[in-house]
């Protein structure tokens, strides 16, 4: 799905949520009225007062302020009476209020007078939907076929890479090496193995956040530029039990963002399961991001590196 298709789908979901909130409110109103019919009468009186007062104001515009003041006073009195009757039934004062999932946007997904901006809740759900959709379900350990690689030696090494990745996914959230770096050229199965880990961990009931490096950077950039601290993308990246980043090295280098936030992310995720796939070699990672990022990535205590390089598929553990 493209971003705009996802927005349309999510707005549908929000409309459904809003209807459900309204129906659920109507249900509570019915229940309360069954137990105390006076509550329904007070509500009808409040509802009927508005059109009556509006007609009075239209008939006599000079008295509009006085009429509006009276309307407010009468309405507050009736609302207080309703609250008192709810208390008599053992119900809280807000029992008849509509309950939205998000009070800020009232489940419209928009905020602001012009509905010009998406609510942070909507942005966060959209990001989740976009991120979540990228894991290819067909990429499973069962479907991974080392026999497609040329040469017996390479097939065996590929099979070993598959076994290491499967063990990583199977042992999650334990396992002694939470950082896993998959390096090597395109076409050797890095993305396949990364997706297979994400799928297996999710099947085992754990949340996994799978991003391309470009999406990772978009989240960091959004956080960096947002005036509020409500942008959820960075905190999701930091706190998600399993984070998988594909294609590290293909994202743009933004000054004050790419290197700084990557270092922050890797530091904050120390000890948490993190899988990174990249076409870059370790020296190339050092050139691009600096040595302190390399040392975060290939920490001798918590990292393992699986190198898939061309005809010569190497597998080594850093320990
Ligand atoms: Zn909202």
Image (cartoon, rainbow, N blue to C red):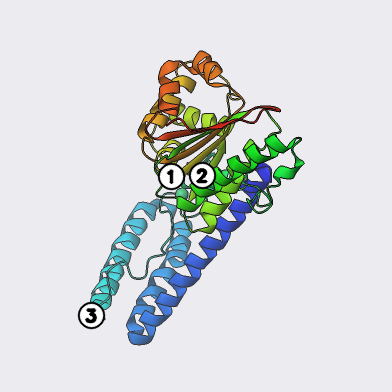
At 50% from the left and 58% from the top, the residue drawn is 204
Between the C-alphas of marks 3 and 2, the distance is: 49 Å
Q: Quadrant of residue 86?
A: bottom left
Above or below for 46 versus 239: below
Single out the mark in the foreground, 3 or 2. 2
At 51% from the left and 67% from the top, the residue drawn is 20
Between the C-alphas of marks 1 and 3, the distance is: 46 Å
Residue nearer the viewer, 314 or 206: 314
Per the rendering, the mark at residue 209 is 2
Residue 272, given in percent of the width and then of the height, sits at 39, 41
Q: Which of marks 1 and 3 is nearer the N terminus?
A: 3
Q: Residue furthest top?
A: 287
Q: Which residue lies furthest to the front in this view?
A: 152
Label 3 crowd (10 A; few <14 / some 14-19 / many >=20): few
Residue at image mark 1: 240
Q: Do the residues labelled 1 and 2 touch (CB within 8 Å)?
A: yes
Between the C-alphas of marks 1 and 2, the distance is: 7 Å
Left or right: 74 in relation to 7: left
- Tell me the element at label 1: loop
- Tell me the element at label 2: strand
Residue at image mark 3: 88
Q: Are marks 3 and 2 in contact (CB under 8 Å)?
A: no
């Amino acid at each position: 799905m493209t971003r705009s298709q996802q927005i349309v789908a999510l707005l549908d979901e929000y409309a459904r949520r809003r209807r459900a909130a309204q129906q659920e409110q109507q249900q509570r109103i019915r229940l309360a009225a069954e137990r105390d019919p006076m509550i329904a009468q007070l509500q009808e009186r409040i509802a009927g007062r508005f059109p009556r007062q509006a007609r009075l104001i239209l008939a006599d515009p000079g008295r509009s302020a006085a009429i509006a003041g009276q309307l407010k006073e009468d309405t507050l009195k009736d609302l207080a009476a309703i609250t008192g009757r709810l208390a008599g039934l053992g119900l809280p004062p807000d029992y008849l209020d509509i309950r939205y999932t998000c009070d800020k946007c009232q489940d419209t997904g928009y905020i602001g007078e012009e509905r010009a901006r998406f609510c942070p809740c909507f942005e966060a759900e959209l990001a989740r939907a976009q991120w979540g959709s990228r894991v290819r379900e067909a990429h499973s350990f069962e479907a991974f076929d080392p026999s497609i690689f040329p040469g017996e030696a390479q097939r065996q090494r590929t099979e070993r890479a598959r076994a290491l990745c499967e063990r990583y996914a199977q042992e999650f959230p334990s396992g002694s090496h939470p950082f896993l770096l998959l390096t090597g050229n395109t076409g050797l199965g890095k993305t396949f193995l990364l997706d297979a880990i994400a799928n297996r961990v999710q099947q085992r009931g754990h949340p996994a956040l799978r991003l391309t490096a470009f999406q990772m950077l978009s989240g960091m950039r959004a956080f960096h530029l947002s005036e509020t601290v409500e942008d959820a993308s960075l905190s999701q990246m930091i706190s998600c039990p399993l984070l998988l980043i594909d294609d590290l090295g293909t994202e743009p280098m933004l000054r004050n963002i790419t290197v700084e936030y990557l270092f922050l992310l890797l530091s904050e995720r120390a000890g948490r399961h993190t899988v990174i796939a990249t076409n870059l070699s370790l020296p190339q990672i050092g050139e691009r991001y600096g040595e302190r990022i390399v040392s975060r990535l290939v920490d001798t205590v918590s990292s393992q590196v699986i190198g898939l390089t061309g005809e010569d598929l190497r597998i080594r553990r850093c320990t």
